[in-house]
Image: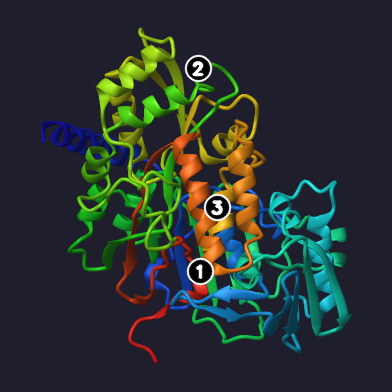
């Protein structure tokens, strides 16, 4: 109990310091908030990097804005059901062949039509081996070729059998070839979604207006302003001023400030975000599995999570999948907190005197991250692992994670807009851009999982992959980060576990 009280004290002190430090900062632009019935203001926690649909982005930043600008063949609705979007129907013709029938009359926001050749070109753009688009590797791992036999039919040939391609494509968005060739799609996106871009400032946010050519139901709000609130202090200040209609990623201590607020209702629920410490194994001693297991035993994940994130937050079950979003492996459990075993493993690996590591994190990106990394560093120090914490704003921090100059440990979380187990596990294969290790055994199991032809085989291979990753860990398994939010009482909204903050999901309260 004394450890939990200490962690709570650290969290409260940090939260107070952050809010105090942020009081002098001003939010850019005019104040819309919930006072303007035709403008919806949404606070996102990460600076934007690109609005090009070929560039994958965080659901707390780029991807959410893209989700309002673009359409996909299928989509996941707020009730977590797979429905058609650009596609009105689809079928799996064989284990490696899928046919999608496109909706007729779809237009881009500039009035140009979208047809099957447009969809085909978007796939070929990602299949180009020379492309630098960050969505490309995942699609190239799955798709062999795409055909457009007529304007309203798209045929996708996969490299191998792939269960759930229809759900996997729910986050793949489409733009226009001519537009990309004459504009900068990162800053001047063209889509067929419910909104179109009015203006963008990557550091501060973007303003969207309704797309007059949208084929679906008209969204409730004429204009949407996404404002970047990259720190906890900025999020709290925006709520105190009533400048936003909805904000997610609030620390529990901050959330409590608004529990009885006249303007906002607050909440916390499970999410699909899985938090880990990624480990850089390109240099000793982190290339030794005994050291990586020692790190897993050295951290009291239950104490940290329950004290800083919420009393109901449990450590992940020794795997990088999260229930109830994923089907987890019931045979695995969290590495038990055992500092003596951690010390013994370090000594066995040749480090009885401990070692020095850098832990990098992006302040304000994850809930209570400043307090969390300090608590982790403190506990690692108790077994002789001396930790130097470094911080950076999200764009610089995430860019460094892709380079050879990556820190020894990275506090990072992952989610996705789909449940496909192979894609959820592929994030940790050796070829993933943020992986700095080699594990051919795990890689092969995930590849086999990708090619499973039955649900039973998918489950069996999923268990095998998670067991291999547990035995040879390349991360410190932590916990599922909760989804916390504050939303205007003038707005109706159903929170999504992936952290989507899509403006088309919002509508004024008390309307039909």
Q: Quadrant of residue 51?
A: bottom right
Residue 242 horizontal/vertical position (percent): 33, 62
Residue shown at the point (39%, 64%) measured from the top left: 246
- The furthest residue to the top: 353
Q: Give the structural element (helix, strand or loop) at label 2.
A: loop
Residue 502 — which label? Answer: 1
Query: What is the spatial separation of the Cα atoms under label 2 and label 3, in whole angstroms?
Result: 31 Å
User: Could you tell me which secondary element the residue under label 3 belongs to?
Assistant: loop
Residue pictured at 56% horizontal, 62% vertical: 457
Q: Which mark is residue 251?
A: none
Categorize mark 1 by other alpha carbons within 10 Å: few (<14), some (14-19), many (20+).
many
**Residue 251 visible at all:** yes
Mark earlier in primary sequence (3, 1): 3
Residue 285 has which mark? 2
| Residue lying at 59% horizontally and 56% vertically, measured from the top left | 423
In terms of secondary structure, where does tag 1 sit? loop
10 Å neighbourhood of mark 2: few (<14), some, or many (≥20)?
A: some
Image quarter hosting the N terminus: top left
Q: Position of residue 43 (x, y in %)?
A: 44, 58
- Disc nearer the start of the sequence (2/3): 3
The image quadrant that residue 424 belongs to is: bottom right
Split into 4 quadrants, where in the image is the C terminus?
Answer: bottom left
**Which of 91/472 is in front?**
472
Q: CA distance from mark 1 to mark 2?
A: 43 Å
Horizontal side of 185 relative to 281 (left or right) equals right
Pick the residue in front: 458 or 76. 458
Rendered view: 180 above or below 94 = above
Q: Which residue sits furthest bottom? A: 512
Q: Which residue is mark 3?
A: 58
């Amino acid at each position: 109990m004394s450890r939990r009280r200490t962690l709570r004290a650290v969290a409260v002190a940090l939260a107070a310091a952050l809010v105090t430090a942020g009081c002098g900062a001003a939010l850019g632009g005019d104040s819309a908030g919930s006072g303007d019935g035709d403008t919806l203001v949404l606070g996102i926690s990460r600076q934007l990097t690109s609005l090009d649909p070929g560039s994958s982005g965080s659901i707390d930043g780029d991807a959410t804005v893209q989700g309002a600008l673009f359409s996909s063949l299928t989509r996941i609705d707020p009730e977590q059901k797979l429905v058609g979007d650009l596609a009105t129907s689809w079928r799996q013709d064989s284990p490696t062949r899928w046919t999608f029938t496109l909706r007729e009359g779809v237009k881009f926001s500039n009035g140009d039509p979208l047809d099957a050749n447009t969809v085909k070109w978007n796939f070929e753009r990602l299949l180009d081996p020379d492309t630098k688009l960050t969505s490309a590797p995942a699609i190239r791992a799955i798709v062999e070729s795409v055909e457009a036999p007529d304007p309203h039919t798209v045929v996708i040939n996969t490299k191998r059998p792939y269960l759930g391609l229809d759900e996997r494509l729910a986050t793949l968005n489409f733009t226009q070839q001519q537009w990309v060739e004459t504009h900068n799609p990162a800053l001047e996106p063209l889509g067929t979604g419910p909104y179109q871009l009015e203006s963008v400032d990557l550091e501060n946010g973007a303003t969207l207006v309704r797309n007059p050519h949208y084929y679906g139901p008209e969204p409730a709000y004429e204009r949407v302003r996404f404002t970047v609130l990259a720190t906890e202090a900025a999020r709290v200040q925006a709520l105190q001023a009533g400048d936003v209609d909805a904000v997610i990623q609030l620390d529990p201590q901050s959330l409590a400030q608004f529990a009885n607020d006249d303007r906002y209702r607050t909440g916390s629920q499970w999410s699909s975000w899985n938090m880990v410490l990624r480990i850089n194994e390109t240099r000793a001693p982190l290339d030794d599995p005994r050291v990586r297991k020692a790190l897993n035993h050295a951290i009291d994940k239950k104490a940290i999570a329950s004290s800083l994130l919420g009393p109901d937050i449990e450590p992940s079950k020794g795997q990088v999948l999260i229930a109830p979003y994923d089907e987890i492996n019931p045979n695995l459990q969290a590495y038990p907190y055992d500092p003596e075993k951690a010390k013994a493993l370090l000594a066995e690996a040749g480090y009885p005197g401990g070692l020095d590591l850098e832990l990098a994190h992006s302040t304000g990106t994850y809930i209570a991250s400043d307090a969390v990394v300090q608590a982790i560093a403190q506990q690692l120090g108790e077994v002789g692992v001396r930790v130097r914490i470094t911080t950076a704003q999200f764009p610089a921090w995430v860019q460094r994670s892709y380079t050879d100059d990556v820190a020894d440990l990275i506090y990072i979380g992952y989610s996705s807009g789909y449940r496909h187990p192979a894609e959820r596990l592929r994030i940790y294969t050796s070829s993933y851009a943020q992986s700095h290790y080699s594990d051919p055994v795990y890689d092969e199991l995930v590849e086999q999982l990708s090619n499973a032809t039955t649900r039973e085989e998918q489950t069996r291979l999923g268990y095998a992959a998670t067991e291999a990753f547990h035995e040879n860990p390349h991360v410190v398994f932590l916990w599922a980060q909760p989804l916390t939010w504050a939303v205007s009482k003038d707005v109706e909204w159903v929170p999504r576990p992936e952290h989507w903050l899509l403006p088309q999901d919002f509508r004024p309260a008390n309307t039909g």
